Image (tube, grey):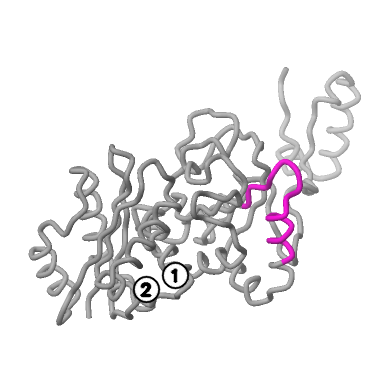
Amino acid sequence: MRTFCVQQLLHRRGYRRGLIGLLAILALLPAAVDAIQLPTLSLRRNDWVTVAGLNWHTDYDVACDEARDAKKMLLVNFMPRAGSDAQRGLEKFLHENKAVRAQLQDYVLVRVRVDERVRGLKTGLRRKNRDRLIDDAAFKHLGRKAGLAMVDYRHGNEPFYGDVVTALPFQDGKYFRWKNSHLVAALGLPAGTITQRTMVWAVRTHPEEPRSTVGTMHAELASLATKHSAYQASIGVQGHQNWETRFHLVVVRAHAGTASEVVAESWENQDLIDSCIDCVQSWRQSPGHWNGVKSRHRYYGYDVRKGSNGIWYGTGIFAD
């Protein structure tokens, strides 16, 4: 069936003649009236919801678009199927903490249920037609459970742009226990990959408040920590292998007078967040290592990598 452009008709023949012509067309084609769709300015009521004084999207793809366009971090709240103490406690905490709500103004917020089904994800989260959003490999560190995840749409030139860079499950782990203060710690993390940020998060949330991450996370030190963690994981042996070479690189690249390093390994077959906590606890048992972790440094870099043996290997590098 031939289609007509209403805008063309009105402009070419004049408003009055165009309107008469349009009415005539509709009169002659009564069967087609139901097929003509006029534009609408109405919005779906479920596009967003206000919770704890904050506006949350309920459409994940729309939230991704906004975060990417605004160059903001995306905070995803995967809600449990039924109400939970953790979810209710988080909402109460946000409602009562103006300072945290102010920090979240720099984030795009979205709430979805753990059984939320979507057709696809935006650039950076490579989805392969799975049904549930929580099942995507990008969110694997949540263990397919309710919790919070952060996606980095702020740092467009970094390799972790569009990646999940923080995952905080509500469910208890071997060492991990959800606390609302964990979100506060995550909001203050430096830019980095999920392994780098989780290692820094584990240091910052230790009850003795070690100060090695009070300074500046140096990109070169973080890169060296990544490489050494990966090396330890590849050979399945914890150690300070080739430290002399790294020492000179740190001093030169950070323009530092001195440098130091800590390493640790987790128990096998643990998830990322438990393994990072485990590494910090290991450092706490070693006076020499703990002195490096608890002390303030001008620059620092942390990372952790998992070996084929199921053990995670952590590295911290400091420059002063």
Pick the quarter of the image with the N terminus. Answer: top right
Q: Residue at x 53, y 56 (%)?
A: 69
Residue 232 percent location from the top left of the image: 21, 49
From the viewer's perspective, is residue 27 above or below residue 197?
above
Element class at badge 1:
helix
N-term mark: 2 or 1: 1
Whether residues under marks 2 and 1 lie with C-beta atoms below 8 angstroms apart, the answer is yes
From the viewer's perspective, is residue 183 above or below residue 4?
below
Q: Residue at x 68, y 74 (%)?
A: 97
Membership of 80 in magenta stretch? yes
Left or right: residue 107 compared with residue 319: right
From the viewer's perspective, is residue 257 above or below residue 127?
below
Magenta stretch in the rendered image: 77-92
Reading the image, the residue beneath label 2 is: 213
Tell me the amino acid under the disc marked 1. Arg
Name the foreground residue: 116 vs 118: 116
Pick the quarter of the image with the C terminus. Answer: bottom left
Cα gap from disc 2 to disc 1, whole angstroms: 7 Å
Reading the image, the residue beneath label 1 is: 204
- Residue 189: quadrant of the picture: bottom left
Left or right: residue 230 compared with residue 269: left
Tell me the amino acid under the disc marked 2. Thr
